[in-house]
Image: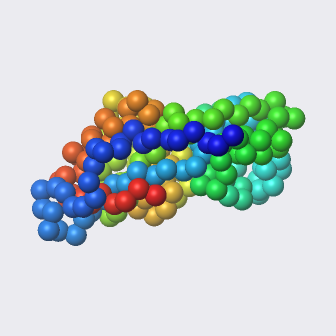
């Protein structure tokens, strides 16, 4: 059976290009939608050492409030025994199968969230400044690989610092457009750019 077509919650709601108070300036913030092939929620995962061994990664990589890679899958902590697994390579059924093969013996379960989340990327020299306006956590001290469940304005998000000056926000699909519009409005003071989805 083929994968059902997935339509973005943001489809038709933005245009690529510069925006903000001074669109001629070098953008301090770039906004983009990211469309991973699969997002899977893992619940009931074992403690860090057992999880690391089951997934074939170093113990040092697996810790609360952190994200790590196991092959082509990134796991981002979002609560005790809970991880959001993301892959651009594996379709949801394949990813769930891989996770369950590794973790079901330890009592974990996997649920497909691929259609239930909107993934937004905020990057640039002012990315942390933008998110610090909206999130009640110390965004400025987040390290690459940190993961936090927090708020962005009124919206519940999972925030992951994926690279230096780059963050991803995972938000309920029904709030995806409202979160996007909030980010765009709040980024205007820094001069912004909307870049193609990926």
> What residue do we see at 19% from left, 52% from top?
188
Find residue 177 and report its image quarter: top left
- Vertical order, 112 against 124 (above or below): above
In this rendering, position of residue 6 left or right of residue 165:
right
Q: Residue 3 at x, y = what percent?
A: 61, 42
The residue drawn where x is 35% and y is 42% is 10
Whether residue 187 is visible: yes
177 on left or right of 98: left
Decide if residue 110 is on the left or right side of residue 13: right
Quarter location, residue 134: top left
Q: Nearer the viewer, residue 109 or 116?
A: 116
Q: Residue at x 71, y 55 (%)?
A: 70
Image label count: 0
| Residue 180 image point, x, y percent | 32, 43
Report the quarter where the N terminus lies: top right
Residue under the point 46% across and 52% down: 34
What's the colour scheme? rainbow
| Vertical comparison of 131 with 114: above or below | below
Q: Visible in this render: residue 126?
A: no
Q: Give the farthest residue toward the front.
A: 1
Residue 61 lies left or right of residue 65; in this view the side is right
Viewer-nearest residue: 23 or 134 = 23
Q: Where in the figure is residue 128, as x and y percent of width and height?
A: 35, 54
Q: Quadrant of residue 123?
A: bottom left
Relative depth, front residue between 95 and 189: 95
């Amino acid at each position: 059976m083929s994968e059902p077509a997935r339509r973005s919650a943001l489809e038709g709601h933005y245009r690529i290009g510069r925006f903000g108070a001074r669109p001629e300036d070098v953008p301090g913030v770039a906004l983009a939608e990211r469309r991973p092939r699969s997002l899977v929620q893992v619940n009931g995962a074992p403690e860090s050492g057992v999880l690391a061994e089951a997934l074939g990664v170093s113990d040092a990589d697996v810790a609360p409030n952190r994200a790590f890679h196991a092959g082509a899958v990134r796991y981002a902590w979002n609560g005790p025994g809970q991880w959001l697994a993301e892959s651009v390579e594996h379709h949801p059924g394949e990813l769930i199968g891989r996770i369950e093969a590794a973790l079901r013996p330890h009592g974990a379960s996997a649920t497909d969230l691929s259609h239930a989340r909107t993934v937004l990327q905020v990057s640039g020299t002012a990315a942390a400044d933008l998110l610090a306006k909206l999130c009640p956590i110390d965004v400025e001290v987040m390290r690459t690989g940190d993961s936090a469940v927090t708020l962005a304005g009124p919206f519940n998000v999972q925030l992951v610092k994926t690279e230096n000056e780059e963050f991803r926000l995972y938000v309920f699909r029904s709030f995806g457009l409202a979160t996007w519009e909030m980010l765009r409005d709040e980024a205007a003071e820094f001069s912004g750019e909307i870049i193609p989805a990926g």
